[in-house]
Amino acid sequence: MNTSVVNTARMLWAALRMLLVLTVVTGILYPLAVTGIGQLAFHDKANGSMVKVDGNEVGSRLIGQSWNIKGTDKPDPKWFQGRPSNSGYDPLATGSSQLSADNPNLVRDVKEAKKQVARFNGVPESEVPADAVTGSASAIDPDISPQYADIQVRRVAEANGLPVAQVAELVKEHTRARTLGFLDQPRVNVLELNIALRELATN
Amino acid sequence: MSPVLADLLLVVALIGALALVHRPFGDYMAAVYSSERHLRVEKWIYRAVGANPDAEMRWPAYLRGVLAFSAVSVLFLYLLQRVQDKLPLSLGFEPISTDQAFNTAVSFVSNTNWQSYSGETAMSHVTQTAGLAVQNFVSAAVGIAVAVALVRGFALPHSRLRSSGGTPIRTGDLGNFWTDLVRGTVRILIPISVVAAVLLIAAGAIQNFGDIHTITTLTGDKQAISPGAVASQEAIKDVGTNGGGFFNANSAHPFENPGGFTNLLEIFLLLVIPFSLPRTFGKMVGNVKQGYAVVAAMGIIWLLAVVAVTWVEYAHPGAASQIAGGSMEGKEQRFGEGPSSLFAVSTTMTSTGSVNSFHDSYQGLSGGVLLLGMMIGEIAPGGVGSGLYGMLIMAIIAVFIAGLMVGRTPEYLGRKIGTREIKLAACYILVTPALVLTGTAVAMALPDGKDAMTNMGAHGFSEVLYAYTSASNNNGSAFAGFGADTEFFNTTLGLCMALGRFVPMVFVLALAGSLAEQKPVPATAGTLRTEKPLFTGLLVGAILIITGLTFFPALALGPLAEGLAA
């Protein structure tokens, strides 16, 4: 047996023990400690910021949902609609279209979406903002731009038999400005807006 | 507030935060790697492993440590994925296929974190936390260790004996790999990760070991909500410049990155170690101005790229973006063009590869800038450790070029850059271009390349080029339309990741050893002042020219052709 083989074996054995010890520290103790702190101090957030209506969980504040008529792929006029999603808002299939900015299929999809959103909401195509006709990165984007919420107000009000001004007020209440004025983009959380809308419509 | 002003404030806040911690954190890291004391927990670890933390290593021994540890890691991670269905908390997921398990094991051990799998439907709780997340820590610690060994090559005084406690240090000693590995993990990465993970949870990131949770929505549909120890993994994924997301959507997933605060925090984490290590370097070589010259070169290149990408994204010249009225395809509403671009540049230039928006859908020219950011070798500021050693290699090249111009033997930090040193530096900078260009050429020549593209034409070529660039430079981000989960790509990209990580490390450690054996030469009037702005300019120029010459033809076929056609 020559010594270099023995040395290599000894080195690998030391490396394996080091890996196992560090696995215990970083792979078991670290996540458990963080989970412990998170579950104690921020229980709701650590478990997904779930939202309840009448005692039942109806979704996560952070995860976008589909607002289609049940069992179809047609948008339901009585709800505010989110951004297009290439996975139908399935959280087990996150990711985006990956189409390049001048891909002919994307050009076609955007054109079609623009026409559809304009017709659905009864507004000219020029008023349709970019987020309404493009897929997000996660495919479960919970937010839309305030402009996209605004162009949906009249259609939602009519479908629910509510005064337009009241629904417009609701959108205003649910519009979030940039965090600290510069950290992110102004936005409206669609699930929260729709829950408030449902309350308004059933009262 | 206008979007542009908001983005400007965001960049200023980020730079401000990085500048604030640069000195204290850089000095802290220098102290960590210079200290002769061991923490109690570290002593336990050394005892459990049976390693002598005070034994000095010359470069071959140090390198053997790096390679042995990494080889064992690849094997362990491979096996863990292959038997994950037999272990507890499996979530019912199948074992990962052989080629994908190889690819993923190499990917995480090489600090690349290229992902050809989709986290939420493939990897069990145990694989994620005890396999992938462990490598997030230790592969980062290995990177810093190698960088510190190179710095010691410059810093250690020639031939000395240190009496206090430890073993005497001989000429050519570079420190102890096990000690550097453990200290980087215990004293640097874990503390930052714990704090960052708690902040992430406070801002909405999830942290649990639950099951997939199905709820009924207001419309009567079912929706499956994913569980996971996400925040703890997100924190180390960013601070260790790893990039492998818990979910397929990576940091675009609202559970990983719920809003503006977490977005800034994550970008800060990506950059904090790479931008602070030059201070550590300056401190350890006994001249902090040397560190400033290096960090300035990193900062200039990073900032140029931020401005370029943000500009092109706002201009959105691509046909589909023109019709949509903005470059929002593949971006989240909460981040938009500005914060997404800042994240994209920071992740590609730190060899991280996590994304908060999908680079495949960026405008042609911004995609080109992101590619270029990786092609310059991940040095502005680069991955943890690898950024610093890559930049120091470029500094040696820059000194050499300057030496040729004036006809003097080049020196850097009192060490002669002789034939052996320049050969090692040259070999270092040839490794990744060779892997990138050969890999791309082979993939394009075979049907595999074309089959994997989502987009056709110039952009399709960019997808392939991006994949090999990302793998060979250990970045891990992707033009993710690229269908990388085939036997061909899992294997070839896996090889690129392994060779792109460990072959350069051989040259770096050999160089460190060669420098450490030299007797320092005193500075004279003719010595190039490498702590001056002139040198920073020379360094930036050398980097851009060398990269430009190497990759221009490939870039012209891909992003340039696409961008100019728009």
Image (cartoon, coloured by chain):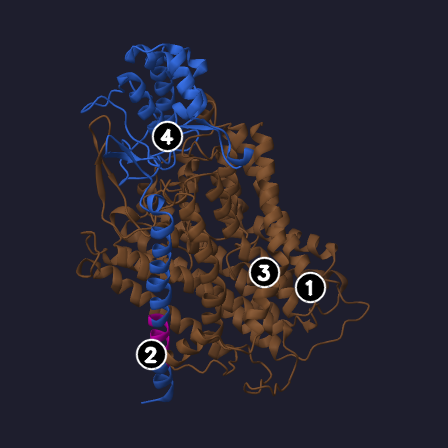
Chain colours: A blue, B brown
- Where is residue A197? Give x, y as percent: 32, 21
Three-letter code, disc 2? Trp
The residue identified by callout 4 is A135
Q: Does dot 1 land on a helix, a strand or a loop?
A: helix
Three-letter code, disc 3? Phe
- Where is residue A131? Give x, y as percent: 42, 26
Can residue A67 be seen here?
A: yes
Q: Chain of mark 4?
A: A
The residue identified by callout 3 is B25
In this view, the mark in front (1 or 3)? 3
Task: Report how far apart the C-alphas of labels 1 and 4 lie in the structure.
Answer: 48 Å
The reply to whether dot 3 and dot 4 touch (C-beta < 8 Å) is no
**Circle 2 crowding by C-alpha within 10 Å: few under 14, some 14–19, many from 20:** some
Task: Report how far apart the C-alphas of labels 1 and 3 lie in the structure.
Answer: 13 Å
Residue located at (56% from left, 63% from top): B389
The reply to whether dot 1 and dot 3 touch (C-beta < 8 Å) is no
* Magenta region, main secondary structure: helix
The residue identified by callout 2 is A13
Q: Does dot 3 land on a helix, a strand or a loop?
A: helix
Q: Nearer the N terminus, badge 4 or badge 2? A: 2
Location of residue B309 with respect to B116 vertically, above or below: above
Q: Chain of mark 1?
A: B
User: What quarter of the picture does the N terminus of chain B occupy?
Assistant: top right
What count of labels does the image hold? Answer: 4
Can residue B434 be seen here?
A: no
Q: Which dot marks residue B288?
A: 1
Same chain for the residues under marks 1 and 4 in the image: no
Three-letter code, disc 4? Gly
The magenta segment is A11-20
